[in-house]
Image: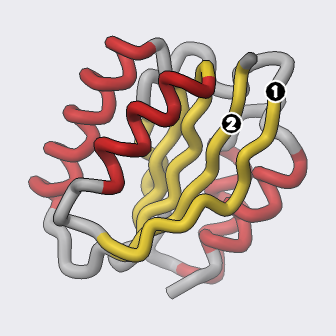
Amino acid sequence: MLHQYLYISTAPNLGSDDISHILESCQRNNRERNVTGLLLYNGRNFMQLLEGEEVDLMWVMRRISSDPRHSGLSVLEDIPAQERACPDWHMRQIRLVDDVENRRAALDAELPVNLAPELRRVMLNFAALN
């Protein structure tokens, strides 16, 4: 059965090269497991949406949990889904604009249209964090 996991973790002080390497690794591993989703980073925290079969998501989450570049991983949502919100994104990074005042609107414009309302709400709240 298809599931969507949404997690948050702490990863302060990562540079753009670190983020690029993480994104490349996500894309490679997710393609192998047919996992899709998106990645947000606000300079201190990651928020990631992962979509796929539960066994594949558990495999990806084990890899993510063992990555020393971040800590405090917490799954915020684990919901069954009828369809993927990000079917063509093995992992897409959505950059949060620097201006906190405009982050929510900018992120809302980039999130998939068919994203579950509860996931959209949590992601938009994440965008307001500084």
**Image coords of residue 13 (percent x, y):** 19, 79
Q: Residue at x 41, y 75 (%)?
A: 72
Residue on which the image places disc 1:
81
State the separation of the CA atoms marked 1 and 2: 7 Å
**Callout 2 secondary element:** strand
Check disc 2: other Cα within 10 Å, few if <14, some if 14-19, many if 20+: many
Q: Earlier in the sequence, mark 1 or mark 2?
A: 2
Callout 1–callout 2 Cβ contact below 8 Å: yes
Residue found at the very far right of the displayed protein: 117
Q: Which mark is residue 4?
A: 2
User: Exactly how many numbered labels are in the figure?
Assistant: 2
Q: Residue at x 72, y 54 (%)?
A: 77
**Image coords of residue 27 (percent x, y):** 31, 26
Q: Amino acid at mark 2?
A: Gln
Q: Amino acid at mark 1?
A: Ala
**Image coords of residue 99 (percent x, y):** 51, 78
Q: Quadrant of residue 62?
A: top left
Taking depth in this image into account, of 100 and 25 the one nearest to the observer is 25
* 30 on left or right of 3: left
**Image coords of residue 10 (percent x, y):** 38, 75
Q: Residue at x 64, y 79 (%)?
A: 128
* 67 on left or right of 118: left
Q: Residue at x 86, y 54 (%)?
A: 118
Residue found at the very far bottom of the displayed protein: 130
**Callout 1 secondary element:** loop
Q: Quadrant of residue 26?
A: top left
Taking depth in this image into account, of 6 and 108 the one nearest to the observer is 6
